Image: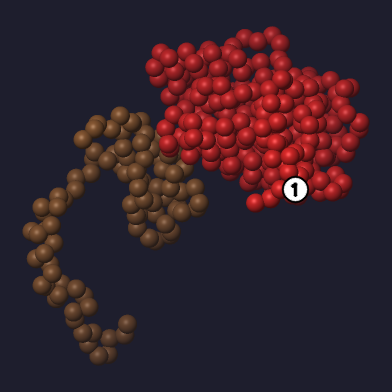
Chain colours: A brown, B red
């Protein structure tokens, strides 16, 4: 694969509103954190998309691999009791 | 001491407020257009979008200011008529705004000089006795704070970057410096409006501007130029050769197809 000749890559996470968690928006190139913040603002938040931005060096992210899919996620498929919806709410409990 | 521009050559006496609004609007329209010339040509994609964003902010401010100028003038001219159907002689922008975009360092240095000035101006203009103008100033201040941050960060990166970026920024600052004096040149029109609490005395912004700009230049390792003579003329319609070329390109559509819309 050709090496990326541009500046280092940063991942951008934007918090859309008050109590919502940050969501991955995309990535930008930048030489440092301040520039990454500004570029993220200009590329992903110029239409009022959020109230807060995180930028993280892409190199700092450790991701699971496609091979991990089986051992990581499949064991959960046959265990519906791990979902809170599996349990009936006892009568008399107010929701 | 208050420095004053020579206003004897100004076109027939107009409504002071209209004249003032044209100055504010034209600075932003012309600089916004210059900045938009980077669209598709900036060093990297992210910066391309950033410069276009700032250009749009400036054109948006110009739209509001020229609309208000047209309403105040009350002669049937809207923002489009003022932007697209006036000749260079009737433009009131500073020379700083109309200079060709140059290289990236030149664009950044010009943007930084103008943005710091515009931020100080907008801050004070929020007290204007004209409510609509005070409202525009509020919006301008928010946008301009970001412009200062963006261009200021680039000043440090270029000045303290490679040998080439440093040399390019120093040469841009050297060339631009003589155009900065005009930003703080007041005249009778402005002073009459200052008395009516409509306008800001721009000569009073100079000390704050110098402090902030010199601070960033120092930090960037850039020498502040010594200039004995400052260029002037834009406020009375005496422009550089560059404005005419820019307007020709900017206005061609409306001039050839009057009233065209899409």
What residue sits right under mark 1 in the picture? Answer: B259
At 55% from the left and 26% from the top, the residue drawn is B107
Q: Position of residue B24 (x, y in %)?
A: 72, 36
Which residue of the protein is positioned furthest toward the front in this rendering?
B256
Q: Where in the figure is residue B234, as x and y percent of width and height? A: 75, 25
Q: Is residue A45 left or right of residue B246?
A: left
Quadrant of the rendered structure where residue B231 is?
top right
Circle 1 marks a residue in which chain? Answer: B
Q: Nearer the viewer, residue B112 or B97?
A: B97
Q: Residue furthest right?
A: B12
| B174 w.r.t. B36: above or below | above
Q: In the structure shown, which secondary structural element does the residue marked by tag 1 occupy?
A: loop
Q: Position of residue B168 (x, y in %)?
A: 49, 16
Position of residue B258 relative to residue A95, above or below, is above
Left or right: A57 as drawn, with respect to B60: left
Looking at the picture, tell me which residue is in the foreground, A13 or B254: B254
Residue at horizontal 39 percent and vertical 54 percent from the top: A15
* Residue at 81 percent of width and 46 percent of height: B77
Q: How many numbered circles are shown?
A: 1
Query: Residue B38: horizontal and vertical position, in percent?
Result: 53, 32
Where does the N terminus of chain A fall, quadrant-wise?
A: top left
* Quarter of the figure with residue B96: top right
- Residue B149 appears in view: no
Q: Quadrant of the C terminus of chain A?
A: bottom left
In the rendered view, would you say A74 is above or below B74?
A: below
Visible in this render: residue B220?
Answer: yes
Residue beneath the point at 71% across and 48% down: B260
Q: Quadrant of residue B157?
A: top left
């Amino acid at each position: 694969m050709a090496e990326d000749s541009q500046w280092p890559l940063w991942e951008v996470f934007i918090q859309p509103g008050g109590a919502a968690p940050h969501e991955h928006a995309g990535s930008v190139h930048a030489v440092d954190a301040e520039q990454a913040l500004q570029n993220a603002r200009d590329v992903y938040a110029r239409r009022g998309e959020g109230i807060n931005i995180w930028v993280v060096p892409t190199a700092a992210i450790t991701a699971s691999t496609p091979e991990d899919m089986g051992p990581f996620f499949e064991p959960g498929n046959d265990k519906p009791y791990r979902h809170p919806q599996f349990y009936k709410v006892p009568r008399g409990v107010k929701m | 001491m208050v420095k004053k521009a020579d206003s004897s050559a100004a076109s027939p006496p107009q409504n002071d407020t209209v004249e003032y609004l044209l100055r504010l609007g034209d600075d932003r329209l012309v600089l916004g257009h210059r900045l938009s010339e980077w669209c598709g040509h900036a060093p990297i994609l992210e910066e391309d979008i950033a410069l276009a964003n700032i250009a749009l902010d400036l054109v948006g401010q110009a739209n509001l200011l020229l609309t208000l100028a047209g309403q105040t003038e009350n002669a049937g001219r809207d923002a489009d008529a003022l932007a697209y159907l006036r000749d260079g002689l009737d433009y009131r922008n500073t020379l700083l705004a109309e200079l060709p975009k140059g290289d990236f360092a030149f664009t950044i240095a010009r943007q930084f000089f103008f943005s710091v000035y515009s931020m100080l101006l907008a801050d004070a203009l929020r007290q204007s006795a004209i409510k609509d103008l005070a409202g525009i100033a509020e919006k301008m201040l928010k946008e301009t704070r970001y412009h200062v941050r963006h261009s200021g960060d680039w000043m440090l990166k270029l000045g303290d970057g490679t040998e080439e970026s440093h040399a390019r920024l120093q040469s841009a600052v050297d060339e631009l410096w003589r155009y900065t004096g005009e930003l703080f040149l007041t005249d009778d029109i402005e002073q009459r409006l200052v008395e009516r609490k409509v306008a800001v005395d721009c000569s009073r912004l100079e000390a704050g501007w110098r402090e902030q700009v010199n601070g960033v230049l120092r930090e960037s390792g850039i020498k502040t130029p010594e200039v004995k003579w400052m260029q002037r003329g834009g406020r009375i319609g005496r422009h550089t050769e560059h404005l005419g070329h820019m307007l020709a390109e900017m206005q061609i559509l409306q001039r050839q197809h009057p009233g065209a819309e899409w």
